[in-house]
Each structure stands twice: as structure tokens, then as C-alpha cells.
Image (cartoon, rainbow, N blue to C red):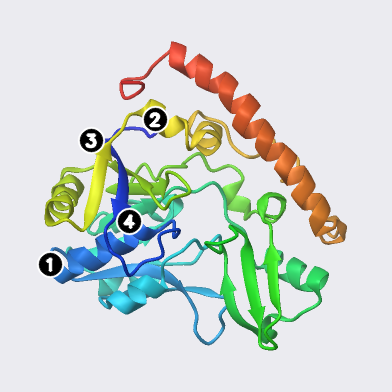
Amino acid sequence: MILDNYLALYKVSSTDNRLDRKNYSRFVTTFLIHCIAKGYYNDALVTTMSQKEPWKAESIITNSSQEIIRAAGSKYTYVPQKQHYTKLNSKSMVVALPCQIDESSKDFLTIGLFCGLNSGPEKLKYICKKKKFNLEDVKFFNYRDTNTNKMKFVLKNDREILIKQRGLNYAFAMPMCKSCKDFSAINADIAVGDYDFAGSSVVVIRTKRALEVFEKCVMDGSIKAEKIGISDLLQHRTSGLILKELGKTYEGNPFISIKGKIKYIIPIKLYNLMGGMLAVYYKYIKSSIIYFIYKLKPSKNSFE
């Protein structure tokens, strides 16, 4: 079933002018800051980029709006979080991947991020080898630059390196991602993903406590929300939902089967070319076929 069970589905935009309008995490950032400012919650566990080692992602607990804004943006990697749980309580929020949300996080308000797959440190090592630089030379790193939608490195000598990621994400996917079927964080209180390229998010409300605080944020004016249906969502986020939530996974992806040293031999341009072709197949061919079949057999939450 697509999205599993939920109470409401929204297209949401932020009214916070401090945030980059192209940033895909504007809703999450605004929601966290507003909930803490209003006293609905006290703090949040978020993933940010290390200031000492800017290519590394790390989890922090914070109630600072500046730190929450600094943590905005995609991090296509897995960062352990559970070591922080003993420092949290029922007035804490947790932003996490679908695979990180389970019984151990039920005491907190959980915000799950739509997730296709993530990669480990191997991908960064591969890029360093191909582009001939060391991670120690990096002074700024972004997994998803808002202007180019590419991975961005800025070296200490001011050299900028932009990398397309499609094929690389598949080839260097973490082992646990290859068989994962949870795209939309089905165990989270709130699930969030990109809706369009204008910075809007799709927000899935799954629990009553989430709906209550979400409606407060709408009433307060910190976010704008428009109810949508599954059919609206599938026009924007088709392939990931279908590949993972209709019982399929990435295991049949040809990039996933690439193993050993051969991964490091294939040029970046070839990964990009093949990854682009595969993305077109998933988005416009395979997804369209499954979309049509699924529409003929609607589940209780589908196609209002």
C-alpha cells in the first residue's frame, strides 16, 4: 500500500523568509524552529555537517534556530542516532530516516524523511580518486546544492567540484538500503518529502499528536498547507514510492550488482549517463505501468 496508513496529506510551504526558497527541507526547518519557539517542544535531534570535518554528517540535539538552519538540506548517508535517545524526552522531536524510526523512538515526535537509498564513505573515496583531491582539503561540502541539485565540494584553494549523483547513489548504496521497502517513513508521526522544485514539501500526517501540532503551526502562520490526494503526490514522487512501497526494492537495479574494484574503475560520466537512462525508465515507463495497474485496484487511502 502506498504511504500505508495516514490521517492527512498536504502540500506545504514555509513562510520563513530567512530560508533559501530552493531548499528542499524548508518545511522541516520551519516546523522545528516554530515548535521550539512556541514551547510546543523543547528540542530536536537533527543531522548536520561537522564543522571540523565538513564532509562528515553527525547527529546533534539542539534548541538553537541557527543550528537547525545550518542542519537544513539533504544528507545522502546514514548517521547513527540512538546513542542520543537517553538525553531526549516526550517534549523532544527527532528527524530521522525511515529505518531509524521504531519502538525505541515512539516517546518522541518523529519526523521521517522520504528515502530512496543512501551511500556510505565509499562514494566519497571514489569521487576523491576520480577528481584527484583529499577530503582533508575540503572546506565546504553539500550533498545537494540548491542551485545545481548536485553534490558540491569547495576546497581550501577555492576550487569548486560539482558531481551528479544518480548512478553513484545506486552503485555505492549501503547494503541495508538495497532491500528496504519503506520509502515514506511509515512508522513516523510525520513523513516529509520533496513535492516540487519550488521548495514545497509533501507532508504525511500519521498520528493525532502530529496533526494537533501541525494544525497549530498552520494557525500560527509559520507554514501554508493545502490538502492533496495520493494521485497528486504520484504526479511528483512516483518512482521511489512505487519501487519501495508496492513490495519492490532496488535489488534489481543493475548498479546495485556492481561490486569490488570495478566500481572504482567506471568513470563518473558513464555512471551519470547510465543513471540518467535508468531514472527515465523508472520515472516514465515502469512507474507509469504500475501507476495504471494500481489505479485499477485502489487501496483504502488511494485516489480520492
Q: Is residue 230 above or below residue 108?
A: above
State which tag comes first along the sequence, 3 or 2: 3
Q: Is residue 73 above or below residue 284?
A: below
Q: Residue at x 26, y 64 (%)?
A: 32
Count up the numbered dots: 4
- Residue indicated by mark 3: 7
Query: Quarter of the image holding residue 184?
Result: top left
The front one of 232 and 1 is 232
Q: Position of residue 296 (x, y in %)?
A: 45, 11
- Circles 4 and 2, Cβ within 8 Å, touching? The answer is no
Bin the neighbour count of mark 2 within 10 Å (Cα to Cα): few under 14, some 14-19, many 20 and up: some
Q: Is residue 29 above or below residue 289?
A: below
Type of amino acid under label 4:
Phe
Task: Kindly report which numbered mark, 3 or 1, lies closer to the viewer in this rendering.
Answer: 1
- Which SS class for mark 4? helix
Q: Is residue 172 visible?
A: yes
Q: Position of residue 83 (x, y in %)?
A: 38, 72
State which tag comes first along the sequence, 2 or 1: 1
Residue 27 numbered mark, or none: 4
- Circles 3 and 2, Cβ within 8 Å, touching? The answer is no
Residue 38 numbered mark, or none: 1
- Residue indicated by mark 2: 232
State which tag comes first along the sequence, 3 or 1: 3
Task: Kindly report which numbered mark, 2 or 1, lies closer to the viewer in this rendering.
Answer: 2
The front one of 11 and 255 is 11
Q: Position of residue 115 (x, y in %)?
A: 49, 48
